[in-house]
């Protein structure tokens, strides 16, 4: 659909430029939407991190993680969200660090974070891990101490060696501006950069000029929204912003018949290197790697799941191998 219809007061009646098929061009998107206020700070932190790792010759992975929100009002009271809580991204970050990568972790604010995830998103609250001591200090309960010690050591080591950079986003526009800017900055690393696009990104949005400024009122009865399609950002990412890096996108489906065809279609359409297909219900157990000439399923057995093995412990070594081929020869296999 070429235009949106929102039966609520809007800021302007300006037409949205589109490509004639109802989807605006990514370049146009950046012209007509406002960049996030913290973009200069984001760029400055990332530039410093990338310079540091370029001088060290590190492999760097740019992970996107968690879901984007789609605001319904410019002064946002309500927004559309999605299910993702960032487990894939946060878990992957740990295995990338283990594989020797420096990690840019661009995540949805307050979503799951590497290392902390083992304690913040369990059944237990933060205080349930602790006990107060008579001398006024606090200590970790002995039964959790070994695990916490191990993870805290890894976490501190990653921070001390400047191998993890935490950056965040909330809304779809913030995500898109930061994806563009971030991937252009990482492009300085050429083939040593990997882009691991695990964030669940909305396909639909309301452009800011068409959005209600103030809280949508309920006095007019029900609310009908028509949303625009989000421009296809993988296209400029692959062909311009990050042209030399290894680009890994995820394809999420709920209908298993669509998974492989849609994943392969994305690879063909955008011309990048790897699509990882996953189903909503089985995403922690099974993924399908699609590359130009291959298709490969990585899967955990029930026993491995019960033993707490994580599918990312298989995904990341496989990607590190593909990335090394890419660095050495410009080919994935
Ligand atoms: C994924 O498919 C991720 O694996 C999940 C992870 C979002 C399923 P959780 O955060 O979930 O661990 O709960 N991410 C990509 C989803 C997406 O938006 N892909 C786009 C598409 O399918 C292309 S980039 O069109």
Image (spheres, rainbow, N blue to C red):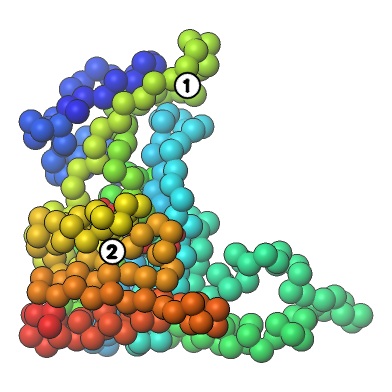
**Label 2: which secondary element:** strand
**Which residue occupies the extreme right position in the image?**
134
Name the residue carrying label 1: 216
Q: Is residue 129 above or below residue 325?
A: above
Q: Is mark 2 within 8 Å of ligand 1?
A: no
Q: Is residue 72 above or below residue 98?
A: above
Residue toward you, 74 or 111: 111
Residue beneath the point at 10% across and 33% down: 21
Residue toward you, 247 or 181: 247
Q: Quadrant of the C terminus?
A: bottom left
Quadrant for ligand 1 reads bottom left
Residue beneath the point at 41% across and 36% down: 71
User: How far is mark 1 from mark 2, CA to CA?
Assistant: 37 Å
Name the residue carrying label 2: 277
Q: Where is residue 36 drawn, in percent x and y? A: 35, 46
**268 with respect to 43 (left or right):** left
Q: Residues within 10 Å of mark 2 (few under 14, many from 20)?
A: many
Give the label on residue 60, or none: none
**263 with respect to 9 (left or right):** left
């Amino acid at each position: 659909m070429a235009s949106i219809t929102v039966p609520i007061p809007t800021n302007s009646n300006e037409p949205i430029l589109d490509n004639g098929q109802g989807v605006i061009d990514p370049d146009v998107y950046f012209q007509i939407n406002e960049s996030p206020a913290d973009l200069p700070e984001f760029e400055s932190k990332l530039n410093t991190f990338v310079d540091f790792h370029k001088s060290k010759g590190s492999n760097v992975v740019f992970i996107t993680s968690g879901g984007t929100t789609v605001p319904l009002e410019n002064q946002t009271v309500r927004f559309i969200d999605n299910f993702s809580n960032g487990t894939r991204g946060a878990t992957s970050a740990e295995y990338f660090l283990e594989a020797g990568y420096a990690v840019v972790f661009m995540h949805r604010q307050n979503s799951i974070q590497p290392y902390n995830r083992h304690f913040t998103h369990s059944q237990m609250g933060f205080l349930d891990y602790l006990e107060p001591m008579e001398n006024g200090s606090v200590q970790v309960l002995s039964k959790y101490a070994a695990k916490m010690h191990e993870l805290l050591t890894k976490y501190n080591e990653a921070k001390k060696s400047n191998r993890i950079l935490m950056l965040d986003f909330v809304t779809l526009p913030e995500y898109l501006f930061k994806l563009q800017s971030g991937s252009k900055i990482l492009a300085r690393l050429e083939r040593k950069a990997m882009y691991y696009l695990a964030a669940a990104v909305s396909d639909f949005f309301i452009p800011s000029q068409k959005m209600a400024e103030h809280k949508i009122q309920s006095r007019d009865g029900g609310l009908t929204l028509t949303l625009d399609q989000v421009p296809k950002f993988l296209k400029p990412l692959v062909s311009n912003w990050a042209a030399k890096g290894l680009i890994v996108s995820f394809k999420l489906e709920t209908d298993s018949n669509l998974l492989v065809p849609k994943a392969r279609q994305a690879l063909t359409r955008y011309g990048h290197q790897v699509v990882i297909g996953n189903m909503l219900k089985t995403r922690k157990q099974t993924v399908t790697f699609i590359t130009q000439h291959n298709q490969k399923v990585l899967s955990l057995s029930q026993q491995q799941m019960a033993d707490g093995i994580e599918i990312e412990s298989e995904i990341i070594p496989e990607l590190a191998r593909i990335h090394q081929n890419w660095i050495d020869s410009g080919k994935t296999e």
